[in-house]
Amino acid sequence: MGEVPVGEACESVDWNPLGSAGAHSQLAGVVAGLVFAGIVMLIDRETPRRPSAKALTMFIAGLVTFALDSFFFGVIAGEQTCPRAWTQTTVAAGMLGVGSLTLFTGLAWLIAGRSEFESPLRLIRVTAYGLSLVIIGQLAVTAHDYLRDVRPEGMYPWLDWLVRAWSALVALVVVGHAFAPRLRYGAHRAVTHAAYLGIAYVLSCAVIFGLLTTVDRSYWADGVSPGVFIAAALLSVMLPGIVVVVQLMAFPSGTVAVRPPVAPALPASREPSPPGAKPPAVEASVGSESSSADPRDNTK
């Protein structure tokens, strides 16, 4: 059996994941380069601030996410087996959404130290909540399309309901977090948790992606096995949903007052004294000496 030409391996499905893999790889690579440049600028600043440190933490997590995601989509672009390419796409799609939200969280912390940026911060917050709902919706649609193309018709209908129920639950949590200020606490502590959770999610996707890549092509000859498409559909929706919620918890609720660095005090300039006048320091010292002298000396 000869090799299937690139781009013709997924002609039997409704959507060809190979057609967009190259564009997604370029997009993730370009964003990773921009994030790296931003990280270098933050590190090179002479007066680091606490919000800038929080932003740097999120940008590092975003850099790792976009760099690996660019590599994953590059691998998908060279795939020859459509079922494996579709399964790999479900893994890489969640990373693209999570990385985008990570950048917005880092940008919010970058301007959180400036009180005059309250209005832009509010705009970024609204955009982040809207982006979170878009990410959840797109991941649910991707999982639905994946199941439609690789799952035999009529098999495991409960899987569609489970994907929809989880997506609706995460969407309700996002909306509740947006309109319930009491839930917005501990953002400073949540930044570290969100960054580590994001990197752990990326590394988990890397392990899953590597396992899918190493599976022999003959394994996919009969399509995707039930165990594989059940795990791929659920993990591609559930794991990113958890990361999205934690990312929103790490979002700053308002601008943070940051004191500028205190410069060393310079000696005060004094006007020249008239000839014959004693300096104030000398007079003070003389007065202090006379006041601290022994009273018995005055009787002599």
Image: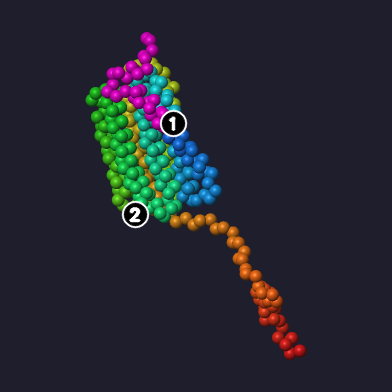
Label drawn at residue 10:
none
The answer to whether any part of residue 290 appears in the image is: yes
Say which of 65 and 255 sits in front.
Answer: 255
Residue position for label 2: 182
Foreground residue among 114 and 206? 114
- Residue at figure coordinates x 37%, y 9% from the top left: 1
Residue sitting nearer the eye, 112 or 187: 112
125 in relation to 300, above or below: above
Q: Is residue 99 left or right of residue 157?
A: right
How is this picture coloured?
Answer: rainbow
Q: Amino acid at mark 2?
A: Arg
As drawn, the residue found furthest toward the top would be 1
Q: Amino acid at mark 1?
A: Gly
Q: Is residue 274 magenta?
A: no
Question: Mark 1 or 2, which is nearer the eye?
Answer: 1
* Residue labelled with disc 1: 29
